Image (cartoon, rainbow, N blue to C red):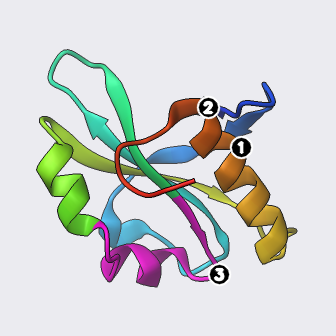
């Protein structure tokens, strides 16, 4: 899935990925509400050096569940070549474009 930032740059996310198949690699993750009509809505986006652990213990998980009306799915853009600053730039670019309901800019 291509997710576009406000910069019009497109990021190639893998997914949907089952939570059990997430990897503990550095990356940017997108929490998507996949509706029965096939539409996808971005609930949240974030970054971590350990994506699997971060999602499993995320402090905004209740927000995802509260706002999802379909299935919560996970998409990941693994970034082994980026440090935290680079991952944060990707996250903020996407967040500014979509203004997801969970999390802040």
Secondary structure of the residue carrying numbered label 3? loop
Is mark 3 in CB contact (under 8 Å) with mark 1? no
What residue is pinned by disc 3?
49
Q: Mark 3 or mark 2, which is nearer to you?
A: 2
Mark 2, Cα crowd under 10 Å, few <14 / some 14-19 / many 20+, is some
Cα separation between marks 1 and 2 = 7 Å
The region drawn magenta spans 46-60
Q: Which mark is residue 41?
A: none
Can you identify the residue that label 2 sits on? Answer: 97
- Of the image marks 3 and 2, the number of the one nearer the N terminus: 3
At mark 1, the secondary structure is helix
Residue 32, percent across and down? Answer: 36, 42
Residue situated in front as seen by the camera: 74 or 41: 41
Within 10 Å of the Cα at label 3, are there few (<14), some (14-19), or many (20+) other Cα atoms?
A: some
Picture layout, residue 98 above or below residue 88:
above
Q: For the view shown, which residue lies furthest in the top direction?
A: 37
CB-based contact (under 8 Å), mark 1 and mark 2: yes
- CA gap, disc 3 to disc 1? 18 Å
Tell me which residue sits at (77%, 75%) in the image. 84
Nearer the observer: mark 3 or 1; the answer is 1
Count of number-bearing discs: 3
Mark 1 or mark 3, which is nearer the start of the sequence?
A: 3
Quarter of the N terminus within the rendering: top right
57 up-or-down from 94: above or below: below
Q: Secondary structure at mark 2?
A: helix
Residue 55 image point, x, y percent: 39, 72
Q: Residue at x 31, y 20 (%)?
A: 39
Q: Residue furthest front?
A: 105
Badge 1 is on which residue?
93
Question: Marks 3/2: CA distance?
Answer: 23 Å
In the drawing, does residue 52 fall left or right of residue 50? left
Residue 70 drawn at (x, y percent): 15, 35
């Amino acid at each position: 899935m291509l997710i576009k930032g406000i910069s019009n740059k497109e990021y190639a996310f893998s997914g949907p990925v089952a939570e059990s198949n997430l990897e503990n690699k550095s990356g940017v993750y997108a929490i998507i509400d996949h509706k029965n009509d096939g539409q996808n809505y971005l609930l949240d986006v974030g970054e971590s050096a350990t994506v699997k652990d971060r999602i499993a213990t995320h402090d905004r998980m209740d927000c995802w569940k509260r706002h999802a009306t379909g299935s919560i799915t996970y998409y990941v853009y693994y970034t082994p070549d980026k440090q935290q600053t680079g991952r944060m730039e990707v996250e903020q670019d996407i967040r500014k474009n979509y203004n997801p309901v969970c999390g802040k800019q």
